[in-house]
Amino acid sequence: MELSEALYRCNKCGFCQASCPFYQLTREEWANARGRLRLVREALEGRLAPSDKYALRLYRCFMCGACSATCPSGVPAEEVLLKTREELARKGFIPSPLEELGSRVISTGNISGEDKSLRLSWAQNLDFPVRRNGKPDFVYFVGCVSSLYPQAYGLPQSMVYLLEKRGVNYSVLGEEELCCGYPLLINGQVELAREIAKKNIAAVKETGAKVLITTCPSCYRMWKKFYPELLGEDNPVEVVHSSQWLAEAGLPLKPLEEKLTYHDPCDLGRGSGVYEEPRAFLKSIPGVGLVEMPLTRAEALCCGGGGNVESLEPSAGEGVAKMRLEQARLVGAKAVVTACPQCRRTLSRAARGSGLKVVDIVELAAKLLTD
């Protein structure tokens, strides 16, 4: 859909207000899709000149896609924002914290700015060596958050443990793995995202693997959807999210007599259409009571960790995370299960002192696996 067509399709009904996490925090018109689309239209028609203030309005967004999913007119607001940000980036209007984020990704290959030699820090305390050689069937693409943030190390540790236990012939890329490029793409730095995609694809091709598995929904969406669009060619590997693998793995699991609820990550759910596989796995756990929050699947509230907002306005993410946790408490859940390292990280911070547990689905599977 052309940008102008998408802008004129908005009938200003306000449905996006109810679904937009930023609007729920601020109650300001600019913070929902209707308001942002009006700003873009004013700029497109020459009544509003691009400026730092204008750009900030369009970057203060979790890019969760809820507005597009709930729009009765079918306006692809997320696509409009991506195209608009690309133009803002070309004109030098990326907010400085996000420009710094992009510079870290380009200079170091990851979002944290750490040296690439630390990419396997998460594997140091394992009881077995992580596989990096041979001719694997699977490549495990770990992602920046799980590789370089200690509070997330449990996720890749659990994933390789499960792969080992199931006898999967896998390998990790280690220092050869780069950021998937999603932070660059949503910054509007499309050419830089394209270059990093080429490098990651070349590294995976080198292994000869047929399947790429990842525990990060943003990495999954980038590989599954955006890499083919950026490069104009099909993926050289089948791309699988860990929750999809769990649903098919047939793992022998210990009983768990607990009431759980599942939080849909935005890039996995609305962004990629993966809703049922995580739930199928959770329902397969003996004794588990799976309850749904008031907003779920395509209507699920963002965790507050998306859209690079953590780099731009950290307090906004915390506010949204608390709203999401309140929805879990309303249904009497004792734990929130998600399938995303960033969701786990954001919700865990907000859950401190609340008595509510937050866990990734892969960590839960590893904990319940019978020997």
Image (cartoon, grey):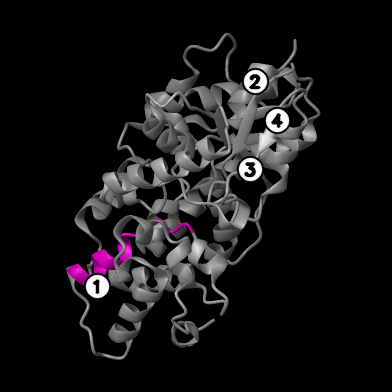
Q: Nearer the viewer, mark 1 or mark 3?
A: 3
Mark 4 is surrounded, within 10 Å at the Cα level, by few (under 14), some (14 to 19) or many (20 or more) other residues, namely some
Amino acid type assigned to the residue bearing label 1 in the image = Lys
Residue 208 at x, y = what percent?
68, 39
Amino acid type assigned to the residue bearing label 3 in the image = Glu
Of callouts 2 and 4, which one flags the residue occurring earlier in the amino acid sequence? 4
338 or 214, nearer to the observer: 338
Drawn side of residue 109 relative to residue 230, left or right: left
Amino acid type assigned to the residue bearing label 2 in the image = Ala
Separation of residues labelled 1 and 3 (CA atoms): 44 Å
**Which residue is pictured at 74% across the width and 18% down the height?**
255
Separation of residues labelled 4 and 1 (CA atoms): 52 Å
Separation of residues labelled 2 and 4 (CA atoms): 19 Å
Say which residue label 2 marks: 366
Say which residue label 4 marks: 289
Say which residue label 1 marks: 91
Q: Nearer the viewer, mark 3 or mark 2?
A: 3
Of callouts 1 and 3, which one flags the residue occurring earlier in the amino acid sequence? 1
